[in-house]
Image (tube, coloured by chain):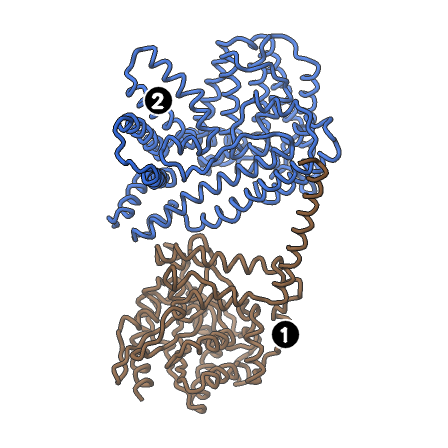
C-alpha cells in the first residue's frame, strides 16, 4: 500500500461513515474491499492477470464459503443478494475497459467482458455444485484444504511458479521464453490462503458458526489486512461486522494515531533503513566486520518497522471501518527469550501455526506416548520450518525455520534445566542478558531470511565473525 | 471520554496540526536553511568522507546520488574532515567527469593515482591530491566549485578542461549551476562574465517553492545521501560500473558544425575564456594549473572530419591554438595533454579514461606539477 492508497482509504472511511451512519456499512465494506483488491493488485507481465488474480481470490473465497456451510441446499436470499452484488461490482470493474485509460481501477485494461461473464457463470455453477453436493461434508472439506495448500505450494516454489507462468503465457499467446517465477504476483494470497484454511479447519472442528457470504468474503479480502496481516479469526471479525458501528471522534483520534505512527514507521524509518539494510548485493561488497553488523542490524530493524508499521496502518484503517483487527507486534526485540519473542512477533501468524499445526501435532504425538522433549523438538522444528516455507519454498527459509525451531527447543530445555538451579541470581542482569542474547539470535537468523542463497548467508556469517574473504 | 469532548479534541488536534504545518513551512521558507541543513552530515564523523563529490544516476546500485545542495555535497567529501597539517601541500583537482572518474573505482581516479605516487615538495612537504571533479562539462560549474574549495586552503589547483566545457551555451546548462544561482551569480557579476545573470535557466525559487513542501525533494536528497553513508563506508562503492558497456564511438557522423560555429576557425570570443580568467583571478595567490585533458582520436569512418564524438577536427585544433595563446599571453600555467593517453584506454566516452589511461595521464602530469610547486 502506498501513501496515496492509505490517504484514499482514510477519505473513503470518513465519507462512508458520514453518509451511512451505520446502515449499509456491511455491503459498502464488501464493495470497497472488492474494489481495493483490484486496485492494489500489482501489474504482472502476463496479459490480464492483474484482473484475473483478484477475481480468482474472490472465486476461491466463494467456493470455500460454500464448503464451510453447515447444510447442503439452496442459499438464503441475503446470500443471493450478496452474490449479485459481488457479480455486479466485478462487472462494473470490467466495464472500465471501455473507459481505459481515462478511467481505470486495474493496472492494465480489463479483459473482454464476455470472458468475465463466462468465468462468473463457471463460478456460479461450481458454487451451486458445492452447495448441493458437498456443503457440510467434512471429508470433502479436507480436499479443499489440500487444494489450497497445493496452490500455495505452486505459487511459493520457484520451479512450479515458473512452470505455471509458462502455461499461462502459452495460454495468452505470449513468449514462454520470457517466463519467470515472479510473473504471478498474487496480491495477498499468502494471507488469503491462511484465512481460508482457518475457516475450513474450524468448520471441520465444528468451531465455525454459520457465516453469511457477505461476512465471509469481507473477512477474507478485508483490504487493510490483505497485504501484511494481521490474520484475524472469522468468529471475532464477524462480531465486529455485525455490531452497529457509528464512527465517533474518539475512534477517529485513536485510528488516526495508529495510522500516523504506522506511516512514520513504514515510510520514514523502514524505507530509510532499507537503503542500507543487508541484501543480496551489498553483503558481497562488504568485507568489514563492523559494517556487516551495521547492515544486518539495519535489516533487523527495517523488517520490524516495515511490518509493524503496516500493521499499525491496517489496525488504524480497520478502526475507521469499525473492525478492531488483532495486535500483531508487542516490542519483540525487547523480549528476554525466544519463546517470548515469538509470542510478540507477527503474533497472529504464530497463533495460527500454534492452533492449526503445533497443537494438533503435539496432541497426536502425545497420544503415541512419545517423550516430551521429542514432542517439543518435532513440534517446534515442524512449526518453524512451515512458518519459514510460508515465506517461500526455498532453502534459506527452511534454514531460517530450523534456526528458530532449534532455538525454541533449546530455550525450552534450558528453562527446564534452570528451573531448580538458576544460574544468575540477579533478575535484572538475567533479563538484560536474555534480551541481548535473544535479539542477536533473531538478528543472525535474519541473515538466512534476507539472503536467497544459503552460501551467501554463510559468507555473511564469516564476515560478521571476522573471517571475511 | 464522551463524544462531545472527543469531537472538541479532534477539532483542536486538527487545528493545531494545520497551524503547526503552516508555521513550520513559513519559517522554513523565510529562513531558507537548506545550506545549513546540508552541513549536518554523518560523513567525516560516523563514516569516512567520500573521496569525490556525490553523483549517481542509479542510487540503489551506486550507493550515491546526485543532489544540488553544495553544503551537503562538500560536507560529505573527505576534505571536510581533514585538518590541514603543517606538512601537507594541498592540491585540488577540478574538472568534469573524467576528473571525477566516470566508470573508475576510487582507487583509479587521477587524484588517487597521483596520491599513490607519494610526491613531496622540495621542502619535504607531502603533496596530497583531492578530487573535486564533477560529472558535467562547464567552466562555470568548475568556477563555482573552485570558489567553494578555496576555504579548504589549497596550495595548488589543477583545472582539467576540454573544449566541450568552453562554449557559452554550455555554461549554465548543468543543473548543479542552475540550482545554485546564489553562488554563481555573484561570480558572474564580480568578474563581468559574459553570461546573463538573469537567465531563465537559473532556478529562482518562488516563496512557495522555498517551503518544506516545495523543498521536499531536495530535503529528501540530503537525507538519502546520509542513508547511503553506511554503504559507502561498508563497500567503498560510490558508482555503479557495469561489467560491459558501449565503447566510445569509433565511426562518426560527417558533421563539422560545432555549437553553430562553422569552419575554419573559432575565435576567442566564441569560448568562455572569461570564465577561466575569473577562476584564476579568484584563486588569487593560489597557483592554478590549466590542463587540456586527453581526448580519444578516432581512426574510424569520418575521422578525417572529426577527432571523436565531441569534436570536429577544425574546432578542436582551433581551440588548442586559442588555449595555448591565451595561457601564454596571461602567463597562466598550462599543459596540453590531449594525446597523453593511448587510444585503447578510453572507455565509454571520448574523455573517460580506464585505470591505465589515468595512470598514463598522471605520469605526464607529475613533472609539470612538481615544476610548478618547486619553482
Can residue A447 be seen by looking at this rendering?
Answer: no
| Residue at mark 2 | A379
Rendered view: B72 above or below A134: below
Relative depth, front residue between A401 and A17: A17
Rendered view: A343 above or below B103: above
- Name the secondary structure under disc 2: helix
Q: Position of residue B308 (x, y in %)?
A: 44, 70
Task: Please tell me in which quadrant of the rendered image residue A38 appears.
Answer: top right
Residue found at x 61% / y 68%: B203
Rendered view: A20 above or below B220: above
Q: Position of residue B323 (x, y in %)?
A: 45, 84
Q: Which mark is residue B199?
A: 1
Q: Which chain is blue?
A: A
- Residues indicated by labels 2 and 1 sit on the same polypeptide chain: no
Give the chain letter at badge 1. B
- Name the secondary structure under disc 1: loop
Q: Which mark is residue B27?
A: none
Task: Please tell me in which quadrant of the rendered image residue A434 appears.
Answer: top left
Task: Please tell me in which quadrant of the rendered image residue B260 appears.
Answer: bottom right
Rendered view: B245 above or below B39: above
Outermost residue toward the right in this view = A19
Give the chain letter at badge 2. A
**Quarter in which the C terminus of chain B is drawn:** bottom left
Residue found at x 51% / y 16%: A202
In the rendered structure, the answer to whether residue A91 lies left or right of residue B132 reads right
Can residue A426 be seen by looking at this rendering?
Answer: yes
Q: Which chain is brown?
A: B
Q: Position of residue B216 (x, y in %)?
A: 58, 57
Residue found at x 45% / y 52%: B60
Amino acid at each position: 500500500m502506498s501513501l496515496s492508497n492509505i490517504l484514499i482509504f482514510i477519505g473513503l472511511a470518513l465519507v462512508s461513515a458520514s453518509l451511512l451512519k451505520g446502515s449499509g456499512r456491511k455491503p459498502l465494506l464488501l464493495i470497497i474491499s472488492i474494489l481495493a483488491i483490484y486496485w492494489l493488485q500489482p501489474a504482472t507481465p502476463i496479459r490480464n492477470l492483474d484482473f484475473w488474480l483478484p477475481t480468482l481470490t474472490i472465486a476461491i473465497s466463494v467456493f470455500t464459503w460454500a464448503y464451510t456451510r453447515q447444510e447442503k441446499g439452496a442459499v438464503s436470499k441475503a446470500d443471493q443478494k450478496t452474490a449479485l452484488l459481488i457479480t455486479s461490482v466485478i462487472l462494473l470493474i470490467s466495464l472500465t475497459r471501455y473507459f481505459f485509460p481515462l478511467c481505470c481501477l486495474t493496472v492494465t485494461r480489463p479483459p473482454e467482458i464476455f470472458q468475465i461473464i463466462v468465468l462468473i457463470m463457471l463460478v456460479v455453477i461450481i458454487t451451486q455444485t458445492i452447495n448441493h453436493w458437498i456443503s457440510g461434508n467434512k471429508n470433502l472439506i479436507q480436499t479443499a484444504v489440500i487444494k489450497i495448500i497445493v496452490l500455495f505450494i505452486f505459487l511459493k516454489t520457484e520451479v512450479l511458479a515458473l512452470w505455471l507462468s509458462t502455461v499461462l503465457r502459452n495460454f495468452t499467446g505470449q513468449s514462454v521464453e520470457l517466463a519467470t517465477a515472479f510473473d504471478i504476483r498474487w496480491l495477498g494470497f499468502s494471507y488469503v490462503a491462511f484465512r481460508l484454511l482457518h475457516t475450513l479447519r474450524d468448520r471441520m472442528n465444528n468451531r465455525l458458526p454459520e457465516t453469511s457470504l457477505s461476512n465471509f468474503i469481507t473477512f477474507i479480502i478485508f483490504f487493510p489486512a490483505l497485504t501484511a496481516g494481521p490474520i484475524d479469526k472469522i468468529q471475532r471479525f464477524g462480531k465486529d461486522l455485525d455490531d452497529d458501528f457509528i464512527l465517533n471522534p474518539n475512534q477517529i483520534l485513536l485510528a488516526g494515531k495508529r495510522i500516523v505512527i504506522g506511516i512514520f514507521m513504514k515510510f520514514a524509518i523502514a524505507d530509510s533503513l532499507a537503503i542500507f539494510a543487508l541484501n543480496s548485493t551489498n553483503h558481497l561488497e562488504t568485507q568489514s566486520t563492523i559494517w556487516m553488523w551495521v547492515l544486518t542490524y539495519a535489516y533487523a530493524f527495517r523488517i520490524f518497522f516495515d511490518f509493524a508499521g503496516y500493521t499499525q496502518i491496517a489496525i488504524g484503517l480497520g478502526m475507521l471501518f469499525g473492525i478492531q483487527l488483532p495486535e500483531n507486534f508487542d516490542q519483540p526485540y525487547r523480549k528476554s527469550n525466544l519463546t517470548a519473542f515469538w509470542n510478540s512477533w507477527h503474533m497472529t501468524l504464530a497463533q495460527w501455526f500454534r492452533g492449526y499445526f503445533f497443537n494438533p501435532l503435539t496432541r497426536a504425538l502425545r497420544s503415541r506416548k512419545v517423550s516430551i522433549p521429542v514432542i517439543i523438538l518435532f513440534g517446534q522444528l515442524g512449526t518453524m520450518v512451515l512458518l519459514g516455507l510460508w515465506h517461500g519454498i526455498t532453502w534459506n527459509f527452511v534454514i531460517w525455520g530450523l534456526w528458530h525451531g532449534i532455538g525454541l527447543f533449546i530455550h525450552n530445555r534450558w528453562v527446564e534445566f534452570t528451573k531448580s538451579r538458576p544460574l544468575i541470581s540477579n533478575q535484572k542482569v538475567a533479563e538484560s542478558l536474555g534480551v541481548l542474547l535473544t535479539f542477536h539470535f533473531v538478528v543472525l537468523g535474519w541473515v538466512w531470511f534476507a539472503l536467497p542463497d544459503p552460501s551467501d548467508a554463510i559468507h555473511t556469517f564469516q564476515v560478521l565473525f571476522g573471517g571475511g574473504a | 471520554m464522551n463524544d462531545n469532548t472527543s469531537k472538541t479534541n479532534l477539532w483542536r488536534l486538527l487545528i493545531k496540526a494545520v497551524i503547526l504545518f503552516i508555521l513550520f513551512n513559513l519559517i522554513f521558507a523565510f529562513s531558507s536553511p537548506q545550506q545549513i541543513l546540508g552541513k549536518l552530515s554523518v560523513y567525516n564523523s560516523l563514516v569516512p568522507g567520500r573521496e569525490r563529490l556525490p553523483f549517481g544516476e542509479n542510487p540503489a546500485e551506486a550507493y550515491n546520488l546526485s543532489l544540488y545542495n553544495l553544503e551537503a555535497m562538500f560536507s560529505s567529501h573527505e576534505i571536510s574532515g581533514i585538518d590541514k597539517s603543517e606538512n601537507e601541500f594541498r592540491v585540488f583537482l577540478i574538472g568534469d567527469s573524467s576528473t571525477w572518474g566516470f566508470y573508475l573505482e576510487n582507487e583509479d581516479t587521477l587524484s588517487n593515482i597521483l596520491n599513490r605516487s607519494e610526491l613531496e615538495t622540495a621542502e619535504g612537504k607531502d603533496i596530497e591530491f583531492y578530487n573535486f571533479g564533477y560529472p558535467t562539462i562547464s567552466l562555470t560549474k568548475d568556477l563555482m566549485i573552485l570558489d567553494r574549495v578555496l576555504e579548504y586552503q589549497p596550495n595548488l589547483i589543477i583545472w582539467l578542461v576540454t573544449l566541450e566545457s568552453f562554449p557559452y551555451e554550455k555554461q549554465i546548462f548543468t543543473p548543479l549551476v542552475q540550482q545554485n544561482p546564489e553562488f554563481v551569480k555573484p561570480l558572474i557579476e564580480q568578474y563581468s562574465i559574459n553570461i546573463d545573470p538573469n537567465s531563465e535557466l537559473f532556478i529562482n525559487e518562488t516563496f512557495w517553492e522555498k517551503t518544506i513542501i516545495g523543498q521536499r525533494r531536495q530535503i529528501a536528497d540530503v537525507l538519502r545521501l546520509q542513508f547511503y553513508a553506511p554503504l559507502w563506508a561498508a563497500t567503498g562503492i560510490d558508482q555503479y560500473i557495469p561489467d560491459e558497456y558501449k565503447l566510445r564511438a569509433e565511426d562518426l557522423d560527417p558533421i563539422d558544425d560545432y555549437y553553430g560555429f562553422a569552419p575554419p576557425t573559432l575565435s576567442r570570443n566564441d569560448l568562455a575564456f572569461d570564465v577561466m580568467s575569473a577562476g584564476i583571478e579568484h584563486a588569487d595567490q593560489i597557483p592554478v594549473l590549466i590542463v587540456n585533458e586527453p581526448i580519444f582520436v578516432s581512426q574510424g569512418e569520418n575521422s578525417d572530419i572529426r577527432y571523436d564524438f565531441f569534436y570536429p577536427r577544425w574546432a578542436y585544433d582551433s581551440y588548442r591554438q586559442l588555449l595555448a595563446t591565451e595561457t601564454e599571453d596571461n602567463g597562466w600555467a598550462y599543459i596540453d595533454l590531449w594525446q597523453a593517453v593511448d587510444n585503447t584506454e578510453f572507455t565509454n566516452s571520448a574523455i573517460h579514461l580506464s585505470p591505465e589511461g589515468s595512470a598514463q595521464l598522471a605520469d605526464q602530469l607529475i613533472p609539470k606539477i612538481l615544476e610548478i610547486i618547486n619553482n
